[in-house]
Each structure stands twice: as structure tokens, then as C-alpha cells.
Image (cartoon, rainbow, N blue to C red):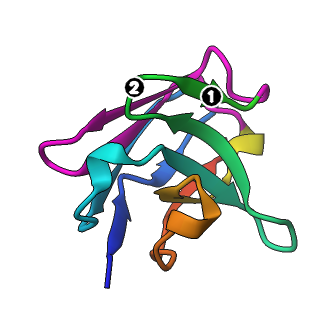
Amino acid sequence: QVQLVESGGGLVQPGESLRLSCASSERFFSTYTMGWFRQVPGEQRELVASLGSGGTTYYADSVKGRFTISRDDAKKMVFLQMNNLKPEDTAVYYCNAVAVDLRASWGRGTQVTVSS
């Protein structure tokens, strides 16, 4: 069973930065479009950024210009650099394949809290 392990979250003040990491055990990781999702209690999980095997990126409007997704296929890892964090970025962040039929079970996620 594929495992996804997210890390790097924490409590930061508005305007600060965090770098999230996700390690995957997926054999075909390098071929998947990987995404970072986030969820706040009571709301649906939303895709905030994705990166395809060919380098195509997607960013939600709310994070454009502030977040950068990257990947290391040799290590089967995906990263999310988050700059100029805002209180509305507070959520649990998860990584997974973007394609629903390729998704692994969700990991535990990593909590990001932005508060002064």
C-alpha cells in the first residue's frame, strides 16, 4: 500500500514562510501529477498546487505568486514552498496524486497555522 508522509508544518506569523515536504512510496511516482491539498474543519479538501511529470504547474488563485511546488522524483518527494503566509492559509495540508483514480490513501497531513 502506498504511503504518503507530509511534514514541515507549524505555527508562523503572517508574512512568514514554511516549506512543506511529502514523501511517497508510490512506485510510479515520477509519472504522476502530484498535488498539495488543504482542508479546514467543516470544508472540503481543496487543491492548492500541482506539478506534472512534464513540469506543468497549477496554482489556486488564492496562492498564486506566494506558493511554489517542486518535486524530486529520485527521492519520490514533492515540496511546497509557502511565502508571505496569511491567516487564511491555516489548514491541514496533504499531498496526493491529482488524478482521483491514482490516489493513495490520504496521509495524516501537516498542520499549518498562521496567526499573530
Q: Residue furthest top?
A: 65
Q: Using the image, tell me which numbered label, if any, was put on residue 54.
A: 2
Q: How many marks?
A: 2
* Quadrant containing the N terminus in the rendered view: bottom left
Q: Amino acid at mark 2?
A: Gly
Q: CA distance from mark 2 to mark 1?
A: 12 Å
Q: Position of residue 22 (x, y in %)?
A: 34, 55
Q: Amino acid at mark 1?
A: Tyr
Categorize mark 2 by other alpha carbons within 10 Å: few (<14), some (14-19), many (20+): few
Q: Is residue 2 above or below residue 46?
A: below
Q: Nearer the viewer, residue 30 or 18?
A: 30
The residue to which callout 1 is attached is: 58
Q: Nearer the viewer, residue 95 or 56?
A: 56
96 sits left or right of 29 in the view: right
Q: Nearer the viewer, residue 21 or 27?
A: 27
* Quadrant containing the C terminus in the rendered view: top right
Query: Which residues are the magenta region?
Result: 61-86
Q: Residue at x 79, y 72 (%)?
A: 41
113 sits left or right of 95 in the view: right
Q: Is residue 77 above or below residue 91?
A: above
Q: Is residue 48 above or below residue 112?
A: above
Disc 1, SS: strand
59 sits left or right of 77 in the view: right
